[in-house]
Image (cartoon, helix red, strand yellow):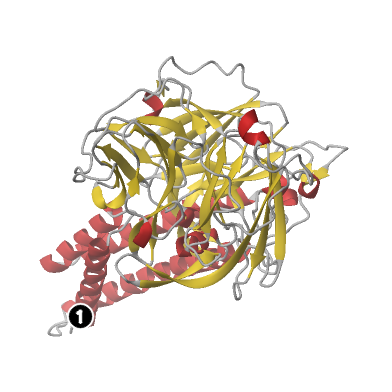
Amino acid sequence: MTTAQLLALDHIVLALVAALWLGAGAATVMSRRDRRTRLIALAGVLAALTASYPVSPVTAAFLVALVATATVITHHRLSSPAGPSSAEARPNRIRARRRGHRSTTAGVAVLCSAVVWAGLSAWSSRVPDRLNLGAHHSGSGARPVADAKPVTDLRGPVTGAKIRRFTLTARPATITLGSGKQVEAWTFDGRAPGPTLRVRQGELVEVRLRNAMPDLGVTLHWHGYDVPVGEDGVAGVTQDAVRPGGEFVYRFPAEDAGSYWYHSHDLSDPAVRMGLYGMLVVGPAPAPEEDSAKSESPQQSPASESSAAEPPAGVSDHTVSVHVLGGVPTAAVDDRPPPTAWPRSASPRTPVRLRVTGTDNAPRILGVSGAPYRIAAVDGRDLPAAREVTGERVRLAAGGRHDLTFTMPATPVLLSADDRADLGVLVTPGSGAAPPPASGPLLDVTAYGTGGTPDPGPFDREITWVLDRGPAVLDGVPTLAHTVNGAVWPNIPAPVVREGELVKITVANRGRDTHPMHPHGHHVLVLSRNGVPAGGPVWTDTFDVGPGEVWEVALRADNPGIWMSHCHDLGHAALGMTFHLAYEGVTTPYDAGHASGNHPE
């Protein structure tokens, strides 16, 4: 029996035990003649059947109080005197005592069975000290390949015509927010977010990561940028985490212009929350006359304004990252902390581009007020025929990016997040009052474009991922986990594809949580959302699958590797919603597991 089947059997047994407990408890208490006890039992059964995730603090407190009250009353009722003795009542008491003994024996048997099963499940679900994720998934549809390649052979080039060099040092720092509150953060170069890395198409990007964090491994994952797999920065899959005092050099060609970001991918949930992230912008290749006017020598200084490429001339181009740091929602503009984020100046008639990134675990609602605007790009890919909208708002998935563009009017323009005037950026020509946050209807990005989605061609393979939440045993601990096809990491079978295949992926969310799904190393073409075809071609690397939604996307397998895919609500990923897309013939020498020092999520 496979691990996935054992986990499914776990769910069935747990459901049966719960049903027995509810039925036996309800029948036992209902047989008594005390009306108050019957009412409390019914309330407990109703709560057990209807309360589900996510449980709010109020609901949790109510359930705890309910169980405590029922326990006290049940104890009082069962321990109360039986009443006056009589010769007639003695046989009834003996029969009742025998029934009670049988009920107790049956209950103890069920309880012992549940405890033994839970213990075996917990033991078998433990992540081993060393777990090779390439070998772990080798039986998931893979065929033997003679010329297998390790991920260490699938790395970026070492030399290029022009190299843009950066150095990032991970270290703790104290960040002062706009309110004056000081926050202890994990940072790159003492900043949260870290320095914005601006490069140009045609350059070779070289980033040296140094780790000055005490007792914390770090990596660099290039979120949304489809690097060679050996540069993907996933601890235990594409590299070992960089230990304190160590370093690692990443190299990849800057080929795809757009907005991206980077973050650590070892213990990524706390790492990103604490500040180990920054922006990556790939600008268009310079015009020939601009290129010839500059020195041909590569830059070799640490990441700073002087080492990053300049934004395009004549455009007011800014990065905006929305992040909760130290419990405070912040908007960092051009990678500077919130005290210097407001405002930004732009002369009338200047083209403005705001590259907005959601670096939290939750989605954001963005609005632009004061000027009509366009969604020029989603996740680093331009939207053809982007139409102008006024007042409408747009949802940004956790981990996603929207490039919002407009022409600067003679009055200020406000980019707001979550309908808050104090969370975003004000672009001003120098005078005038800020407009209120946008309050129009939500715009559906999948229906925003025009012309329909081109037929990608016949599919070579179809994959279905059913997202849910349910009880599971995760690394030996019973957990209300986030599951894919009923299983949790590392027991979610990895689909194995061949290079060149066209893959159709159907993602169905059966739960009540939103899951921003992020396949590493690839963009996917949105085919439909809830059965409605996309209005225009939308390529994305992070798409929000809401409760009850079904998305269909197409993926071209053109980047060989072992690629992590996961929910980018990183708390969900840590609770099981992490899996892989593997290519035939690709292996990894790296291990996850407790003794490896690597924590892919």
Q: Quadrant of residue 65?
A: bottom left
Instruction: Tell me the quarter of the picture where residue 346 sits.
Output: top left
* Residue 227 position within the rendered picture, expressed as x and y whole percent measured from the top left: 66, 42
Question: Eyeballing the image, is 175 above or below 423?
Answer: below
The residue positioned farthest toward the right in the image shown: 146
Residue 548, above or below 308: above
Q: What percent of the width, then of the height, locates residue 26?
A: 26, 60
Is 72 displayed left or right of 184 in the figure?
left
Q: Does residue 81 appear left or right of residue 2 in this picture?
A: left
Q: How many marks?
A: 1
From the viewer's perspective, is residue 573 above or below residue 286?
below
Q: Residue at x 42, y 58 (%)?
A: 17
Question: Quadrant of the image for the C terminus?
Answer: bottom right
The residue singled out by tag 1 in the image is 76
Hey, which quadrant is residue 211 in on the image?
A: bottom right
Describe the element under mark 1 as helix, strand or loop: helix
Q: State whether residue 114 appears in this view.
A: yes
Name the residue at 18% across, 81% down: 82
Residue situated in front as seen by the camera: 157 or 504: 157
Residue 130 visible, this angle: no
Give the amino acid type for the residue marked by disc 1 in the picture. His
Q: Which is nearer the eye, 582 or 161?
A: 161
Tell whether 294 sits left or right of 51: right
Q: Counting other residues with Cα less than 10 Å from the Cα at mark 1, is it few (<14), some (14-19), or many (20 or more)?
A: few
Counting from the top left corner in percent of width and height, residue 478 is at 49, 63
Q: Is residue 50 depicted above or below 274 in this figure?
A: above
Measured as percent of width and height from the top left, residue 27 is found at 26, 60
Residue at the spot 67% in from the left edge and 31% down from the top edge = 557
